[in-house]
Amino acid sequence: MSELSDVGMINQSVPPEEEAEWKLPSFRKVGVILLILTETALFTIFVVAYLFYIKKSLNGPYPQDVLELPILATVALLSSSITVVIAERAFMKNARGTFHLWWGLTMVLGLFFLGFTAHEWYTLIYRDGLTIATNVFGSTFYALVGLHASHVIIGLILLGLVFVLSLLGHVKPDQAERIEMISWYWHFVDVVWIVVFIVVYIISRSA
Amino acid sequence: MATTTEEEIDIELSPPGEEKGVLTGGIQSLFYTVDHKKLGLMYIGSGLIFFVIAGLMATAIRIQLAIPKNDFLEPDVFNRFFTMHGTAMVFYVGMPIIFGFANYLIPLMIGARDMAFPRLNAFGFWMFFFSACLFYFSYLGAEGLYGAGSAPDVGWFAYSPLTAKAFSRGHSTDYWTLSILLGGIGSLATALNILVTVFCFRCKGMTLGRMPLFVWLWIVVAFLTLIALPPLSACQIMLTLDRYLGANFFNTQAGGSAVLWQHFFWIFGHPEVYILILPGFAIASEVIPVFSRKPIFGYPIMVAASVMIAFISLGVWAHHMFTVGMTSLGNTFFAISTMIIAVPTGIKIFNWLGTMYGGKIRLDLPMMFCIAFLFQFLIAGLTGVMLSVAPFNWQLSDSYFVVAHFHYVLIGGLLFTLFAGIYYWYPKAIGRMLNHKLGLWHFWLFIFGFTLTFAPQHVSGILGMPRRIFTYDPGRGWEIWNFISTVGVPFQIAGVACLVANMIWSYFKGKKAGDDPWDAWTLEWATTSPPAEYNFEKLPVVRSRRPLWDLKHPEDPDWKHE
Amino acid sequence: MACMLIGLTTAIAQSDSTVHEVANMFEPKSTPAEMIHEISLLVLLICGVIFVIVTTLLVYTVLRFRRRGSGDDHEEPPQVYGSTQIELAWTVLPILITVVLILVTARTIGEIQDAEMPADALNIRVVGHQWWWEVHYPDYDFVTANEIHIPLSSATERRVTHVALESADVIHSFWVPQLNGKTDLVPNRTNHLWLEPTSTGTYLGNCAEYCGTQHANMQLRVIVHPPDEFAEWVRTQQAAPTVDPAVARGYDTFVSNSCVNCHTVNGTVADGVFGPDLTKLMTRQTIGAGVAPNDTANLRSWVRDPQVLKPGALMPDMKLLDSEVDDIVAYLQTLK
């Protein structure tokens, strides 16, 4: 066949009734959904490893001896999902002050959660003598909770970046979708915590 | 008219008609390019380089095994070679080359200007490239205690606890772990990028049901990658924690489980097989219709079968573990799920045959490779069925029969379709045809060498030869089969040499290809060869699965039938 | 193989010294292997038929529908997009075949894996080590290595051997193709398989899971005896060892070196468990898990420096003097 590079030819071969609206999903949303999908697969393996090793440690300390229910931290992290939505709504309405307030509050709650994790780990290591090398409980616990905490850190970095840029006036109203994506990610981190909470602090303590 | 409604995009057009090579912008542009076509070719090019290196290792392995009690390679060197060969062929040859094809072709096939995230695309490539360099650097960098170390020698699936500090001193295993972890991040980025591109950047009229099968198969592959690679990354993270922080995930002395590694690894490992072979199917699904001059037979069921393969493949992993001592219930479950996968796979083979049936088959090189693929993949599929029968598997697994089986899958299946893809799309990417005569040499030498090398391995496996042994005693009935197997190697090398020579020669001297040398039907043939950086001057609008067919046959366009 | 047999300094009396050198899984000599053989023939048959049919279709299609000449290039063949009936047919047929396969597979898995062990089954326990096999006979209270002796099963006297499989380090796999399929030896876990040999002789096998440097030389021999001969072999193994005064110097050298930290010789201070039990060393056909025949020259070479015969073996070069090597070998050769 001869040269076909004039794509106009193809387009001409398509009858005009094909003029119907052509709409594709937002690439940011699809991207974040897929990111969450693949992260879910990653967490699943760590959760499975944790569940598999429940009651398989050859020596203590065991979860029921040393773990305490992190009620306050959980409340803080879960409510940060609400504050981030309020912030996002404020952003849509272009209420920048309200946005900063609630966005900042989200970060404070996230930081509080991280502080709790740091304190918990410190206690476990220095009071209870549980390190990652102590037994399979230690290995799976620090790996799973640590993996989640590292996601909280990433989320906080994203939140913080937006916060600073917005204060400096670099965040424009047409970037609402990016704000929304960060909040999606933050919801994901929260949902993972619910799973971690159930598996680590409820199931393994009572097993 | 349709064209006027296209979004006007302001692009500097290069002077039309000018002959422009792939290396426009010089070598240095390769380092900062974010163009999906250049990255695609870089993937394929570096994959081919690693293919040659890993192939040479296989050659050394075959020389060592040519005769019993050979001392060509020391045991440790042999063990490193098969580890490096296997790991490299999967992660640094198979993965990059298929990603290269996807990168190059998907935006063209769906009428997009680039991938959704061009910089993420470059990031994915460089992660792969860096991880491959790290992997090979282990030869230099991994000298550990008392000279233990050097390259990894734990096998490509690295069963724990052989990878524990106690049994693998030095840093060789760390190089293996870290490079795979890094490469995995790159693959995840690329897979995500491909999906977003396909879902969000199709040209007007390109509904999901009108995409070329190539793109459909890549949706499946990219989803599988996103779901199956994280388990691999997870177990590499656990292994690293074990080796560096003394964690006990796979430490059998502290209650850790050696079998857990196998589960996690094969939850990745089996879908990985499909991640590698489905892109082969993708190429066959493009080449076979064009060279049979008929549309693909049963497009919807082809799509359905691919999706089904992906789903089932997530539930078959423990068929790699029939000998590990699972309960009879577990063994039965995984035998059944594995057998079920034969159904959609069979459908695909029959549909390709159905496509050829009643056509006018042009026996050009891409088609020849695809026909060889059909034959060899049939054998691979049938030995796969044998392996899925758990009791038979207790005999066959970890023997040379398995080695033969997966080389029939990965060479006979994947590599032959990749060769088909190279002959098919080289004219598009380079603008010149590959030499036909040299191609024929390549085809016949390679298929002869391949058969000579791998067919006898079925027999040595049945005669009780385990895989991964560096030597064997005379008199066990394995000598002749191993010798024949080694004799096949030079033919394969000669075949690949023909291909390499062909690619280089044709780059300079090949016949000009024109836009559409094969009289094909998908959108990539509707632009120049090689395509401009922006792919299409005006984004196309399509109304069927074969837009160029519609263009060439206005009297009977496809959209009247779909 | 002949030279190996000649090289044997001590061969136990065997009525049938056949060595089944080619471990062909299609010549099974034991009940479970025969059951596998049966199902594998069926599977081969089914796959063979499919292969012939599909290959014929492929060849026919290519030959029949190849383009002839280049004259009719511009005339395309009829465009067929698919056919529901045909596609349905080639979906349903494979499903039927799969169902058949599933049924026979499930049955055979159960028959082999869940087979009831008779009460008088011989129990042995095999522990995998990098790169040798430790073999316990708990019923008779002795330990040997690398060569497993078991009784023949016959129509008149059914003798089943139940093997428990464990590992001391990494994963290994127990595979003697003519006797049964393979089963892994996994640390922290006990696996099981059973053997019911139907003809005597020596069967060869290998470790079938890559386990490190000398994976290739982790070979396995199973020697099947008629029951009375087996009983005699057991008595030999159980016999109390004595130190021949003629090799007292060798004995002294042996026990005063670190040999005793890894090896056991019953009745002496040697009680190490990292290496093979040497109490009845000379009743074994090979050394180093099949790396070489058990003759004086090889034994000397091994005691002098195991890394020559089996590079990477975990037994180090003991840096013994020539005279010490001679003494130790002389002593070892009395262990029978």
Image: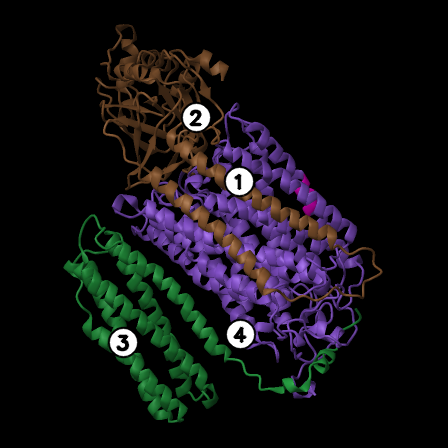
Chain seen in green: A
Residue A151: name its quadrant: bottom left
Which residue position holds label 3?
A77
Write down the residue under mark 4.
B199
Report the Cα–Cα distance between label 2 and label 4.
57 Å
Question: The chain shown in brown is which?
Answer: C
Question: Which x, y percent locates residue A66?
Answer: 16, 60
Q: Residues within 10 Å of mark 1 (few under 14, many from 20)?
A: few
Mark 3, Cα crowd under 10 Å, few <14 / some 14-19 / many 20+, is many
Give the CA distance from mark 1 to mark 4.
Answer: 45 Å
Tags 2 and 4 touching, CB below 8 Å: no
Q: Secondary structure at mark 3?
A: helix
The residue under the point 40% across, 29% down is C179
Question: Which circle, 1 or 2, is nearer the viewer?
Answer: 1
* Three-letter residue code for mark 3: Leu
Q: Is residue B494 magenta?
A: yes
In whole angstroms, how far apart are the C-alphas of marks 3 and 2? 63 Å
Quick one: SS at disc 1? Answer: helix
Q: Share a chain, discs 1 and 4?
A: no
Asked if badges 4 and 3 are on one and the same chain, I answer no
Please state the horizontal and vertical placement of residue C39, each as a whole percent of the image: 45, 38
Say few, some or many: other residues with alpha carbon within 10 Å of mark 4 (under 14 / 14 to 19 / 20 or more). Answer: many
Q: Is residue B217 above or below residue B316?
A: below
- The magenta stretch is B491-496
The residue type indicated by label 4 comes to: Phe
Kindly identify which chain the residue marked by label 2 belongs to. C
> Is B411 above or below relative to C237?
below
Q: How many marks?
A: 4
Q: Colour of chain B?
A: purple
How much space separates mark 1 and mark 2, taking CA atoms? 28 Å
The residue indicated by pointer 2 is C204
Residue designated by label 1? C45
